[in-house]
């Protein structure tokens, strides 16, 4: 063991493959969805409580910042869903080769972004 190994890794210098970014985004989107769950439950409760709270909620959702938050949550859900299907396919050994794993990571990013744009256009 004569090699000098670094004591601290320079994480910003490590070149990740696309599948690594998909994995990190999958974890990040899961954390976003988990942390936004109380907000989403509160919105559901407010929308069902009365017509006054529903109309107030609809007024709040007309602001650009709230639309941006909704689009972000839609992206988090769609990315987490598509990446989850990718990981299920990998676990079932249908996308176990390196070429299929690389192409499926491209598909996850593409499909989740396209669906987010389509739903975002519908929201605005």
Image (cartoon, rainbow, N blue to C red):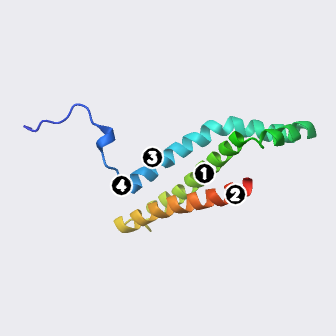
Left or right relative to 65: residue 93: left
> Residue at the location (42% across, 66% down)?
103
What residue would you read off at disc 1?
Answer: 75
Q: Earlier in the sequence, mark 1 or mark 4?
A: 4
Crowd band around label 2 with a 10 angstrom C-alpha radius: few (<14), some (14–19), many (20+): few
Q: Separation of disc 3 and disc 2 at Cα?
A: 26 Å
Closer to the N terminus: mark 3 or mark 4?
A: 4
Looking at the rendered image, the disc whose residue lies closer to the viewer, 4 or 2, is 2
Q: Secondary structure at mark 1?
A: helix
Q: Nearer the viewer, residue 54 or 124?
A: 124
Give the mark, 3 or 2, whose residue is nearer the N terminus.
3
> Is label 1 in contact with label 3 (beta carbons under 8 Å)?
no
Badge 4 or badge 2: first in the primary sequence: 4
Evaluate if marks 1 and 4 touch, with contact meaning CB atoms under 8 Å apart: no
Whether residue 92 can be seen here: no
Which of the 4 image quadrants contains residue 117?
A: bottom right
Residue that sits furthest to the left in the current view: 2
Q: Say if mark 1 contacts mark 2, CB within 8 Å.
A: no
Label 1, label 4: how many angstroms apart (C-alpha)? 21 Å
**Tag shown at residue 121:** 2
Residue at the far front in the pictured view? 64
Q: Nearer the viewer, residue 35 or 64?
A: 64
How far across and down, in percent of the image, does residue 35 sit?
Answer: 61, 36
Residue 17: mark: 4
């Amino acid at each position: 063991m004569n090699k000098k190994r670094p004591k601290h890794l320079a994480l910003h210098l490590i070149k990740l493959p696309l599948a690594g970014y998909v994995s990190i985004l999958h974890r990040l989107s899961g954390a976003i969805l988990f942390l936004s769950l109380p907000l989403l439950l509160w919105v559901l409760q407010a929308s069902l409580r009365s017509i006054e709270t529903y109309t107030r909620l609809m007024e709040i959702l007309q602001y650009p910042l709230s639309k941006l938050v909704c689009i972000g949550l839609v992206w988090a859900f769609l990315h987490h869903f598509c990446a989850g299907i990718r990981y299920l396919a990998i676990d079932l050994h249908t996308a176990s080769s390196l070429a299929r794993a690389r192409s499926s990571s491209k598909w996850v990013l593409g499909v989740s972004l396209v669906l987010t744009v389509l739903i975002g256009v519908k929201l605005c």
